[in-house]
Amino acid sequence: MRISTAQLYDRSIQAVLDNQGDLSDIQQQLASGKKLLRPSDDPVGAAQVIRLTEEIDLISQYKKNNNLVTNSLEQEETVLSNINTALNRARVLMIQAGNGILNVDDRAAISSEVKQIRDQVFDLMNSRNSAGEYIFAGYQSASPAFGLNQSATGNKYTYQGDDGFNQIRVSDTVKLQVNNNGKEVFEDVLARLKATLSSSVGATSASVKVSEQGNFDKFHKANYDAVTPLNNEFQATVLAGNQVQISNVGTGQILDTIDFASGVPFSFRGLSFQFNGTVGASVNFQLNTPEKQNIAETLNNFVLALNDRDISETDYQNALSDALVGTDNAMNKIGTATSAIGGRLNVAESVLNATLDLEITNKSARSNIEDVDYAEAVSELSRQETALEAAQATFARVTGTSLFDYIR
């Protein structure tokens, strides 16, 4: 086959250009640290790099979400801790206010501090996060969670939010609750459960009061019927043999038979009874409907009782018991919410650790595919330089071959 001079030049130039291109690629790899300069270098590897990069970017967003969740939960935990501290102080003052030697002026002095605690708790219940959103307002985070309606008869603290809560995804499979709504933490708090006399037959000077709140609460929760009101009424009937029988009016079920003496107090499931009567006399009492009251309202009612100079001792003791039980129930709710926050913080930390491990794994896999091996690249650079020098020398020798060289 004959090779023309043009072909010799073309092939020699192409060899030099190819070697220059290969040398340029190696130089770019060393400069950028990446061995995949274009998808055509490794189509499969390039596709894997794109997928791994997407995963790493997603993990980066999950890390930001996790940080947002952690900050929000820690802020809420701090607010609840401050409320709990304030309520502990309020409870101490309530116990102090129950001292029988205090007069109305002493009670008024105590009320001034309880009033400050009430206002502090109200402000904390309307706490806002760094974005200016009300933490405990549910989905209505642009408005205060609790409102204050002032009137001549006293203040009224009401919940204005809803029962919603926000969630943020911190991994492909895990979403964490960012906040608790005020309805769950503060509003749905049981007030003191009570029982009242409803009627009596043949009995005089009858009375009933809760003497052991814990025992009565158990009895109330086990026997209260929200569907059939008659089942919430009970009857104490005096029997022969100095006994009194307790039965349910609605169901007719006999609950207990207790020793009885007219005018002498007797106890039943946390209730203390006292009435005068002979055989056949009876006293009916009923379980009051359970009510819920937020802690700000509980404290406010206690302030009103402390400042009421005309309140009877019985009503004052009932107000004091209402305040103590309401405060205890509120603190239990706050404790439950704080425990839930701690659990979510633990989950967030665990997910974050798993996310960081996955990020390291994905970055390592991507690095293995796209990052240059400097030792190998430097060796390849030397080889390509040698190849280019050889191609250039060959070009000079080939293009210098002609008949004129021999004639000279």
Image: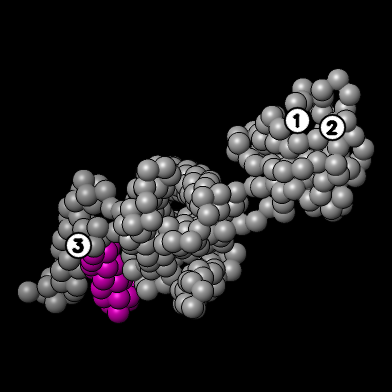
Q: Estimate the x, y position of residue 365 in percent, counting from the top left.
A: 40, 48
Q: Residue furthest right?
A: 252
Could you tell whether 202 is left or right of 104 in the image?
A: right
Q: Are marks 1 and 2 in contact (CB under 8 Å)?
A: yes
- Could you classify mark 2 by the number of other residues whose Cα lies within 10 Å: few (under 14), some (14-19), or many (20 or more)? some
Q: Estimate the x, y position of residue 7 in percent, counting from the top left.
A: 32, 75
Which colour style is shown? one colour
Q: Are marks 2 and 3 in contact (CB under 8 Å)?
A: no
* Residue at which label 2 appears: 278
What residue is drawn where x is 42% and y is 72%? 133
Q: Looking at the image, tell me whether mark 1 or mark 2 is earlier in sequence order.
A: 1
* Residue at which label 3 appears: 31
Front one among 59 and 275: 275
| Label number found at residue 262 | 1
Does residue 163 appear in the picture of this structure? yes
What is the secondary structure assignment of the residue under circle 1? loop
Front one among 359 and 222: 222
